[in-house]
Image (cartoon, rainbow, N blue to C red):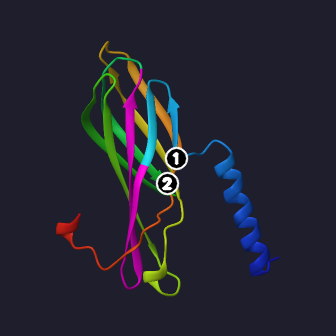
């Protein structure tokens, strides 16, 4: 049985509230990594919007970490990136997250809603110990909306 639209939107609002009140946040810590999602932005085109934010990783245990694999998952879309990126002891590293969405109505009036990403980090610390960290984060809400089409040189 299908829910009336007003009931469905109430259930969606309840679900979003439960997710944001639970374990999913814009910041947190998992093992030797503290993280926070920052700098959310959106560029609206005629029929779609391009969203992005940065995830700032900070090493908190005093040992540098070399990441060899970073996995980003949004819904059913998964991106495995094989890298060699060092996060210095007590240093920071920024990772860019980008996604797009279609617009309902006038794209220029759209602000980005939050989405939940799953991140998995694989690597070794300076002592050669394996590091495997996975966590979910919710993107910050976008307050300012830019209207226009992003060109490759803008990225």
Q: Quadrant where the N terminus lies? A: bottom right
Which residue carries the number 1 mark? 26
Between the residue at mark 2 and the residue at mark 1, the CA separation in whole angstroms equals 6 Å
In the image, 125 versus 90, the foreground residue is: 90
The answer to whether 9 is drawn above or below residue 72 in the figure is below
In the image, 84 versus 80, the foreground residue is: 84
Principal secondary structure, stretch drawn in magenta: strand
The answer to whether 119 is drawn above or below residue 53 in the figure is above
Give the magenta range: 38-60
Secondary structure at numbered mark 1: loop
Work out whether mark 2 precedes mark 1 in sequence or the reverse, and give the earlier one: 1
The picture places residue 68, in percent across and down from the top left corner, at: 30, 33
The picture places residue 120, in percent across and down from the top left corner, at: 44, 39
> How many numbered circles are shown?
2
Residue located farthest toward the left when viewing the structure as drawn: 153
The picture places residue 72, in percent across and down from the top left corner, at: 42, 48
Quadrant of residue 124 in the image? top left
Residue depicted at 48% across the width and 87% down the height: 106
Residue depicted at 47% across the width and 63% down the height: 142
Residue 15 is left or right of residue 92, and the answer is right
Residue depicted at 76% across the width and 69% down the height: 10
Secondary structure at numbered mark 2: loop
* Badge 2 vs badge 1, beta-carbon distance below 8 Å: yes
Which residue carries the number 2 mark? 139
The picture places residue 29, in percent across and down from the top left corner, at: 51, 31
Residue located farthest toward the front when viewing the structure as drawn: 144
53 magenta-colored:
yes
Residue depicted at 27% across the width and 73% down the height: 150
Residue 121 is left or right of residue 16, and the answer is left
Q: Dot 1: within a 10 Å radius of its alpha carbon, few (fewer than 14), some, or many (20 or more) residues?
A: some
Residue 63: numbered disc: none
Residue 95 is left or right of residue 141, and the answer is left
């Amino acid at each position: 049985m299908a829910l009336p639209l007003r009931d469905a939107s109430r259930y969606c609002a309840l679900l979003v509230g439960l997710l944001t009140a639970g374990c999913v946040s814009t910041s947190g810590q998992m093992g030797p990594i503290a993280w926070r999602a920052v700098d959310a932005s959106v560029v609206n085109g005629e029929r779609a919007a391009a969203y992005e934010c940065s995830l700032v990783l900070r090493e908190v245990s005093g040992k540098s970490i070399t990441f060899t694999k970073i996995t980003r998952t949004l819904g059913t879309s998964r991106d495995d990136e094989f890298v060699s990126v060092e996060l210095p002891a007590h240093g920071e590293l920024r990772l860019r997250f980008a996604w797009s969405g279609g617009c309902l109505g006038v794209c220029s009036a759209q602000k980005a809603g939050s989405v939940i990403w799953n991140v998995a980090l694989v690597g070794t610390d300076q002592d050669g110990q394996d590091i495997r960290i996975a966590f979910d984060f919710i993107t910050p809400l976008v307050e300012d909306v830019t209207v226009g089409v992003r060109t490759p040189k803008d990225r």
